[in-house]
Amino acid sequence: MNIDNYNFAGKKAIVRVDFNVPLDENGNITDDTRIRGALPTLKKILADGGSLIIMSHMGKPKGKVNPKMSLGHIKDAVAKALGTDVQFAPDCAAAADMAAALKPGQALLLENLRFHPEEEGKPVGIDKEDPAYDAAKKEMKERQKDFAKTLASYADVYVNDAFGTAHRRHASTAVIADYFPADSKMLGYLMEKEVKAVDNILNNIKRPFTAIMGGSKVSTKIGIIENLMDKVDNLILCGGMTYTFAKAMGGNIGTSLCELDKLDLALDIMKKAKEKGVNLVLGTDCVAADAFSNDANTQVVSVMDIPEGWEGMDAGPETRKLFAETIKPSKTILWNGPAGVFEFDNFTAGSRAIADAIVEATKDGAFSLVGGGDSVACINKFGLADEVSYVSTGGGALLEAIEGKVLPGVAAIEGK
Ligand code: AMP
């Protein structure tokens, strides 16, 4: 079923969104991107004359009620964004009466799903090593089904628009779909867009295809690096992982970030790239600092020869040029992970050079996808989010999708 073709008139729709927005100490929203992201879906349902039951998690309350993570904090913001009143159900598992009373055009926001351990379906208070763990897990899985069934009982139709949690098989993201027939469950607009963007990267590649992987560690990116190796023409590896590669090649890396147990893996990646004809692009020079601080002293040095007591914090000028030259002629671009400690203003140049080159390539007709946590913060910091083809709202979900894994949240609806 496709959301655009579905008429919600007279129907009650339960929609899983990702309203896990950052709050300040007073409970005020500091970034409402996720709320804005879900609006097309929510507004379509109301405009059709449906009633809306909105559900989300916030933070990691670990199955317990935690007032700091109450979705009550964002009720007014959601109402404002939707342009209509929003009622609030203080317990998502006891909202049947409120849901039943909803009239067409009315909206109800459920309290944080993760106040109930059943949402995640993981047993609480028991260690994985405990001999009773397996039995506890089995029991929790049964409770998860009941919880999902309760949520499902509120509505006639289920919509999943929470891409950020689509890689989790939780009650509200996947299990609930079992309680709706195929013609009464669907992806929301945001999910559709995310899935299409990933499809463009994986299955609709215009060449050259350049992937830029940065961030702090090789270990968290290895799955995606291996998967991309079969697809890309150019693979730029930057950020903190640069120094694991430099060390593996026998360089002196001072106090730079390094995963000593991943040196062989780094050499293996280099070997595989050669075998597969992938142009692996690593930084040659870096901006090194004498402390992990924005105000540290800096010098530009070779990544293979960083002085004792200094650490590589950003890509150097030669590297920035190399990265930009690789990116600009590309027709498909994926960027995940910054090229330096971009949170410090003095170490943004590498990430900025990448962002600028992506923007230029996009103007020349490339499809560019920026995603995964910090790259989004980075592109937002530069004010360039509107100048790339797509900025994904997913972190882990995006990476898993690009690794080629089927996302449980998508599979539950598409029946794969
Ligand atoms: P990740 O979560 O793995 O994508 O890593 C993102 C983090 O990597 C950001 O907070 C960056 O500050 C950090 N990062 C990027 N380059 C470096 C570097 N050369 N040294 C230390 N941290 C870095």
Image: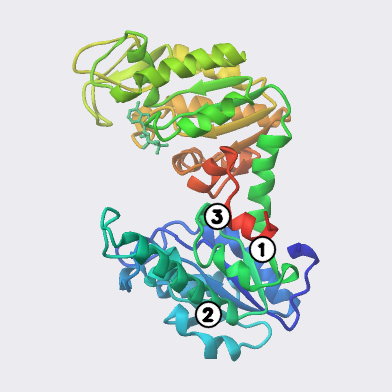
Give the mark, 2 or 3, whose residue is nearer the N terminus. 2
Report the front residue among 158 and 72: 158
Indicate left or right for 254 with 221 as reference.
left
Vertical placement of residue 279 versus 67, above or below: above
Between discs 3 and 1, the one toward the N terminus: 1
The residue at which mark 2 appears reads as 150
Are the two marked residues, 2 and 1, in contact with CB atoms closer than 8 angstroms? no
Q: What residue is rendered at 44% in x and 73% in y?
A: 143
Q: Quadrant of residue 359?
A: top right
Q: Nearer the viewer, mark 3 or mark 1?
A: 3
Q: Which mark is residue 111?
A: none
Identify the secondary structure beneath mark 3: loop
Q: Is residue 347 above or below residue 195?
A: above
Disc 2 and disc 3 in contact, CB within 8 angstroms: no
In the structure shown, which secondary structural element does the residue marked by tag 1 occupy? helix
Q: Amino acid at mark 2?
A: Thr
**Residue beneath disc 1:** 40
Kindly tell me whether residue 258 is visible in this rendering.
no
Give the distance between the C-alpha atoms of the residues marked 3 and 1, in whole angstroms: 18 Å
